[in-house]
Amino acid sequence: SGTSINSVGANAQVIAQNLVMNATAGSIGSVLAPLKIDLQTAGTLTANATNNIALWEQTGDLNVVRAYGGASDTDTVWLKSDGDIVNGAVINTDAVRGGNIQLLSDNGAIGTGAKAMLINTTSTAGDVSAAADSDIYLTERTGDLRIQDISALAGNVTLTALNGSITDSNA
């Protein structure tokens, strides 16, 4: 798409084995109206936008090869999954990149102990929120990991900042 990709109705959904979305001059979904998706077993997501990305995996896991949104502090990459949110990116490559990052797993984990979710908040004022029913493994590859809210209801949280500090963005 040359501009934004949005849902035309509350029940609209994209079902695919592997999903590639490009909004070269806009957003993919919005936080108030995320685009609903259903990746089939072992399916992957690749999404690129100049502004926001808001995608909601309706059933199962969300295997993120790449979700790159805009770099400003007003741009957010918002990903939600009924199951796990896993890092499907090439080793040492960001799976999620954006000004702000919000990851939500209703019935699973975010990342794994063997392969953390590699993220890159590209705005110096950008922050990270994550909530999961199980464990959360996040690694910020560049700069500080500015935490707004991290919650693992029935699991552990492992946070790593490879080239910066871990800070409280609420302070």
Image (cartoon, rainbow, N blue to C red):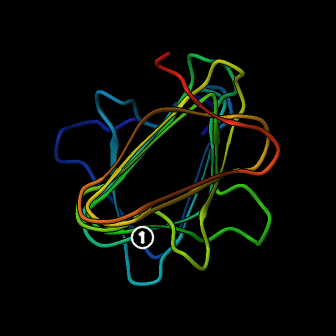
Identity of the residue furthest to the bottom in this view? 41
Residue where numbered disc 1 is placed: 16
Q: Is residue 141 left or right of residue 67?
A: right
Residue 81, position in %: x, y?
A: 33, 58
Residue 93, position in %: x, y?
A: 77, 61
> For mark 1, does the 10 Å Cα neighbourhood hold few (<14), some (14 to 19), or many (20 or more) residues?
some
Q: Secondary structure at mark 1?
A: strand
Which residue occupies 78% across, 51% down? 162
Residue 59, position in %: x, y?
A: 25, 68
Which residue occupies 30% across, 73% down? 60
Q: Quadrant of residue 87?
A: bottom right
State whether residue 131 is above or below residue 71: below
Identity of the residue furthest to the left in this view? 11
Which residue occupies 28% across, 36% down? 8
**Across the whole image, how many numbered discs are drawn on residues?**
1
Q: Quadrant of residue 163?
A: top right
Q: Is residue 31 left or right of residue 138?
A: left
Residue 82, position in %: x, y?
A: 26, 62
Which residue occupies 68% across, 68% down? 89
**Which residue type carries mark 1?**
Ala
State whether residue 54 is above or below residue 58: above
Q: Is residue 19 left or right of residue 36?
A: right
> Which quarter of the rendering shows the N terminus?
top right
Q: Nearer the viewer, residue 30 or 7?
A: 30
State whether residue 126 is above or below residue 44: above
Q: Nearer the viewer, residue 67 or 24?
A: 67
